[in-house]
Amino acid sequence: MKRLIEGFDHFRRNVFPSQRELYKKLASGQSPSTMFITCADSRVMPELMFNSQPGELFVYRNIGNIVPPYAQHVSGVVAAIEYAVKVLKVRHIVICGHSDCGAMKALQKPELVKDMPSVAAWMKHADVARYVVEQNSHSLSQDEALACLTRENVVGQLEHLRTLPTVAAAMARGDLSIHGWVYDIAHAELDAFDAQQGRFVKLDLNAAELPEATPHLRFAASAA
Ligand code: ZN
């Protein structure tokens, strides 16, 4: 805990003074352009990875970067998404998985979470990925299966995301795009799901077009 308090002291004395104006502006409101949903894993640090400033990213983290589908039972992540879309009016939602994910390993070996009933119940929301991989990918090594599961979990959670009415409505009129990424911790690389190609591709800053996980909009603002 002392390490945290020392860290805050460092921030107050060495970081805050040079950004005083920014913090003054942010003290009365936020308008982030992107909601970033990723795993709670301590090795995944969105603000560091994207060199982002306070107020830029609306980050939500949970075990396995999961978004439960629309249902009567409301989860924290679903409430946060609704708020981000309706109030903050974010233009993008990214769901980002990562390499060496403990949650994905638990999907591979459910016995790892047998003494954690809440985690086991939470991981049910990722069953879609387990089934897709089990029934469609054969003769994969353990590592390949884990990577495949990690990608399929992102695709599955993107599909859950589309079941939320606020998300579906904003996407249909072109106000919101959704993206599925996987972060490789060892190599500092990001792969993005390309819906048109039906596969993950390397994110390349110089590419003519960035991969899109979003279906085409149906209600353009001008037609509304
Ligand atoms: Zn993880």
Image (spheres, grey):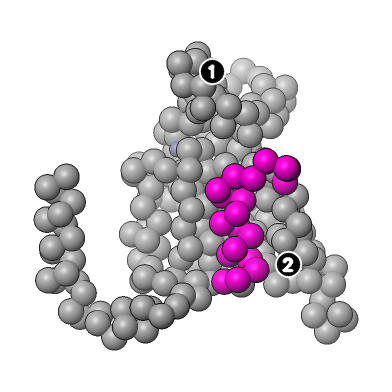
Residue bearing the label numbered 1:
110
Q: Is residue 78 visible?
A: yes
Magenta region includes residue 84: yes
Q: Which mark is residue 170?
A: 2
Amino acid, disc 2: Ala
Q: Position of residue 89 (x, y in %)?
A: 61, 72
Instruction: Give the magenta part as a residue range.
Output: 70-88
Magenta region includes residue 53: no
Does residue 72 sit above or below 56 in this rendering? above
Amino acid, disc 1: Pro
Residue shown at 58% from the left, 22% from the top? 140
Does residue 223 sit above or below 170 in this rendering? below
139 vs 26, nearest the viewer: 26
Please state, as top left, top right, bottom left or bottom right, where the C terminus lies in the image: bottom right
Q: Is residue 210 visible?
A: no
Q: Position of residue 68 (x, y in %)?
A: 64, 42
Q: Which mark is residue 139?
A: none
195 vs 130, nearest the viewer: 130
Q: Position of residue 69 (x, y in %)?
A: 70, 43
Does residue 147 sit above or below 155 in this rendering? above
Q: Position of residue 102 (x, y in %)?
A: 43, 30
Other residues around mark 2 within 10 Å, as few (<14) / some (14–19) / many (≥20): some
Q: Dot 2: what SS?
A: helix
Please state, as top left, top right, bottom left or bottom right, where the N terminus lies in the image: top left
Judge from the rendering whether residue 123 lies leftward or rightward of residue 105; answer left or right: right
How far apart are the two marked residues, 1 and 2, measured between alpha carbons?
36 Å
